[in-house]
Amino acid sequence: MAVQDNALTTLANVKAMLQIPTLDTSDDAFLEGLIDRASDICEELTDRKIKDYAAITEFVQSIEDNKIYPLQYPINSVTSVAYNTGTFSAPIWTAVTVDTGYDVDPYSNLINLYGTYGPTTKFQIVYRGGYTTVPKGIVQACEIIVGMFYNTRNSHGATNESVGGASVAWDAEIPKKAEQLLAPFKRYVF
């Protein structure tokens, strides 16, 4: 089994964190499943896709201050920007040219439009967005979540466990440290 395309860490990193010898492959498939689930959770908590994928097409219903706020960022490349000159049910997409019609702000990752558009103008943007190199904080958050799942795999529903006089307690939810690491990467709606 291989990890999903959106996997935010590797099997080797997780095994090193959990101090599982590289040659011990008995839990590899299970760990890969946990990496996939933890990566999905990280995307849910940040409300966006994190890794760079193939180009996506996004339809923006309106703009504010001649700016388009794409859902996926950072923006890696823009294939096209167009606005609807037709109707909602029969759109006619008119291209906006790069440099004279729009640019991408490298700091905010917004698409700045030049020209006059109404507040309800519909736009179609085709672009690639997401991290080509996932930030270390996101990777660490994913690994923390994998570690929590792995270490509590035999104790579903329990919040503590006692064995031979020793007691261990854990949170039933996503660890706070993982949430704190992901907080700066959360997509905010403008």
Image (cartoon, rainbow, N blue to C red):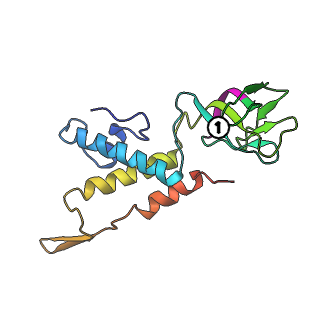
Q: Residues within 10 Å of mark 1 (few under 14, many from 20)?
A: some
Q: In the image, is residue 4 above or below residue 174?
A: above
Residue 171 drawn in magenta:
no
Residue 166: x percent and y percent? 18, 72
Q: Residue at x 25, y 37 (%)?
A: 22
Residue 28: x percent and y percent? 24, 39
Q: 55 or 18: nearer the eye?
A: 55
Q: Residue at x 30, y 49 (%)?
A: 18
Residue 76 drawn in magenta:
yes
Drawn side of residue 23 relative to residue 98, left or right: left
* Quadrant (top left, top right, bottom left, bottom right) of the C terminus: bottom right
Q: Which residue is mark 1?
A: 59
Q: Is residue 21 visible?
A: no
Give, as a three-letter code, the residue at label 1: Phe
Residue 6, quarter of the rendered image: top left
Magenta residues (range): 73-81
* Quadrant (top left, top right, bottom left, bottom right) of the N terminus: top left
